[in-house]
């Protein structure tokens, strides 16, 4: 077992072995979810605060369900109704929560590096649920889990990520995770949102959609993150759809067994049409299902859990 970390802050700093430990532990915990008694009380007596300062549907809900399955006590912090609105700093907020004997803080924040900062100033375990355009490590882990479950491996696969790479924390975490596990990553989208600098991370960059998807084993689609863009990055939505939107006509260019992924939320009719999003190649809702097991695995491991063998033996 190769996991000794107190926090999960990013994928960049993880080794391939650590990533595989999370995936194997998640696989064992997914099996627990099929038993008559679905709980695995590894966090009994521990308190988790879900500190979401940015909106979330999937990540927040699946962290909460994962914490319930691990028998933790849960506090859902509502930023809008908190003293953050009165000017309290993130550090003071977190230290006041910790003064109430909180053991874990799961944080989503618009500022890149916010989880790393909290990990430096708190004793509690910190888990990054998305920090600005930097990283979204549990999304990458659930993406890797879903690919491995469906394809049986990560190494040697061609994975194409299409869309707003520049502002996407999912893209960064996926790139780190996929390349560490031996996948070949291609990035595609408008040149303003897919700068050539990403080649330095070991990716191929192309602005030709057909070239990007014809050999892909997996296509991961990202929405345009208008909330992070300070200026218009391409002429308009219609041009985006024309050059980069995925629909049945474009699916005809792909391998017959390609997987279609999307972290959500989807902008239907923009990066993907409804027929493809809900079609037989789509694993978008499987990604959501797998998010729970992956987040259980992360909480279990940062709490000192010994890995999949401990789950299987329980
Ligand atoms: N994929 C993802 O992070 O979705 P939410 O913003 O709904 O959590």
Image (tube, helix red, strand yellow):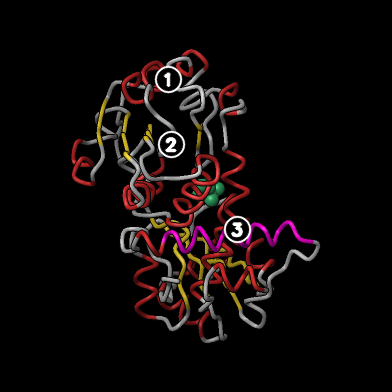
Residue 51 circle label = none
Residue at the image point whose x is 38% and y is 25% from the top: 213
Q: Quadrant of residue 61?
A: bottom right
Residue 195 appears left or right of 75: left
Return the residue at label 1.
Answer: 241
Query: Are discs 1 and 2 less than 8 Å apart at CB?
Result: no
The mark that comes first in sequence, 3 or 2, is: 2
Q: Tell whether circle 3 marks a residue whose Cβ is less than 8 angstroms from ligand 1.
A: no
Quick check: can you spot residue 248?
Answer: yes
Quick check: can you spot residue 73?
Answer: no
Residue 69 is situated, as x and y percent measured from the top left of the image, at 69, 66
Mark in front: 3 vs 1? 3
Q: Quadrant of residue 268?
A: top right
Magenta stretch bounds: 19-35
Return the residue at label 3.
Answer: 293
Q: Quadrant of residue 41?
A: bottom right
The mark that comes first in sequence, 3 or 1, is: 1
Residue at the image point whose x is 42% and y is 45% from the top: 154
- The secondary structure type at the circle numbered 3 is helix
């Amino acid at each position: 077992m190769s996991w000794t970390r107190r926090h999960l802050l990013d994928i960049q700093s993880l080794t391939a072995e650590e990533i595989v430990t999370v995936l194997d532990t998640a696989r064992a915990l997914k099996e627990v979810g099929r038993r008559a008694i679905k709980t695995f009380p590894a966090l009994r007596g521990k308190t988790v605060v879900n500190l979401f300062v940015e909106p979330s549907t999937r990540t927040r809900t699946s962290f909460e369900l994962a914490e319930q399955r691990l028998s933790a006590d849960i506090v859902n912090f509502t930023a809008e109704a908190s003293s953050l609105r009165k000017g309290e700093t993130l550090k003071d907020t977190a230290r006041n929560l910790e003064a109430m004997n909180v053991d874990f803080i799961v944080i989503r924040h618009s500022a890149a590096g916010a989880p790393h900062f909290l990990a430096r100033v708190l004793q509690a375990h910190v888990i990054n649920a998305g920090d600005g355009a930097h990283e979204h490590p549990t999304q990458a882990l659930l993406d890797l889990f879903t690919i491995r479950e469906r394809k049986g491996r990560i190494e040697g696969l061609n994975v194409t990520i299409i869309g707003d790479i520049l502002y996407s924390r999912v893209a960064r975490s996926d790139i780190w995770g996929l390349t560490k596990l031996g996948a070949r990553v291609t990035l595609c989208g408008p040149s303003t949102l897919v700068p050539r600098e990403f080649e330095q991370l070991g990716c191929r960059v192309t602005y030709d959609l057909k070239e990007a998807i014809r050999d892909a084993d997996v296509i991961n689609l990202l929405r345009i993150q208008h909330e992070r863009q300070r200026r218009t990055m391409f002429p308009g939505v219609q041009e985006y759809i024309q050059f980069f939107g995925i629909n049945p006509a474009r699916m005809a260019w792909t391998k017959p067994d390609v997987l279609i992924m999307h972290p959500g939320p989807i902008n239907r009719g923009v990066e993907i049409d409804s027929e493809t999003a809900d079609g037989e190649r789509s694993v978008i809702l499987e990604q959501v299902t797998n998010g729970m097991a992956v987040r259980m695995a992360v909480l279990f491991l940062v709490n000192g859990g010994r890995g999949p063998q401990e789950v299987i033996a329980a």
